Amino acid sequence: MNYLAHIYLSGENDEIKIGNFIADSVKGKKIINFPEGIRNGIILHRAIDSYTDVHLLFRKSSTRLFPQYRHYSPVIVDVFYDHYLAANWSRYCDTPLKEYVEEFYSLLKRNHELLPNNVKMFLPYMLRDNWLVSYASIEGISKILSQMNQRTKNKSKMDLAVKELELYYEDFEKEFFLFFDDLKQFSSNRILDL
């Protein structure tokens, strides 16, 4: 899953939200450098990623993209699934998406000193372009995929994947809804275990 899903799946605990958000920037044993609540968020993030990678519905979505995008397919599906979460936000949360995202950005600003350096580097761009809200539109997803493609030096061709999103929109959406119900239950159980 991508940023929005990881944040949402953290529940109401701010430290878990921060840890879940920064987890990709915290490698190996560097986890011990963070307070317990943030460590729990990092652990949750890793569990969500492991669960997602082997889930049959997520793999089905990834397989649809594999002929064109090869090993980048799961990364693209992560972004697609954040699109479906953002586009259907009211189905999952009573707080409007813009308000929810603003509260999260405020949380990051208040805890800026805890963020890894590379998160501090991309955060101004995330805030300026409001990535999390932009996921709700095809145009926003197109921009995110273009930026990701640039980071791969244009090898991934992820910027072209919006074609498949539009072509198979209902298929990906159906897989997302079923998958995300499973993932929500999994994440809730993992939080109870932390």
Image (cartoon, rainbow, N blue to C red):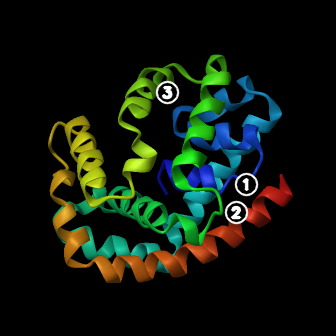
Q: Position of residue 94 (x, y in %)?
A: 65, 63
Q: Is residue 145 above or below residue 86?
A: above
Mark nearest the camera among 1 and 2 is 1
Task: Say which of 62 and 177 sits in front.
Answer: 177
Residue type of the residue flagged with mark 2:
Ser
The span from disc 1 to disc 2 (Cα, nearest Å) is 9 Å
Q: Secondary structure at mark 2?
A: helix
Q: Is residue 144 left or right of residue 173?
A: left
Residue drawn at (79%, 37%) of the image: 37
Q: Is residue 71 left or right of residue 99?
A: left
- Residue under label 1, please give it: 11
The span from disc 2 to disc 3 (Cα, nearest Å) is 23 Å
Residue type of the residue flagged with mark 3:
Val
Residue 169: which quarter of the image?
Answer: bottom left
Q: Secondary structure at mark 3?
A: helix
- Tell me the number on the disc at residue 186: none
Q: Earlier in the sequence, mark 1 or mark 2?
A: 1
Q: Earlier in the sequence, mark 1 or mark 3?
A: 1
- Residue under label 3, please give it: 119
Q: Earlier in the sequence, mark 2 or mark 3?
A: 3
Residue drawn at (61%, 58%) of the image: 48
Image mark count: 3
- Residue under label 2, please give it: 187
The span from disc 1 to disc 3 (Cα, nearest Å) is 21 Å
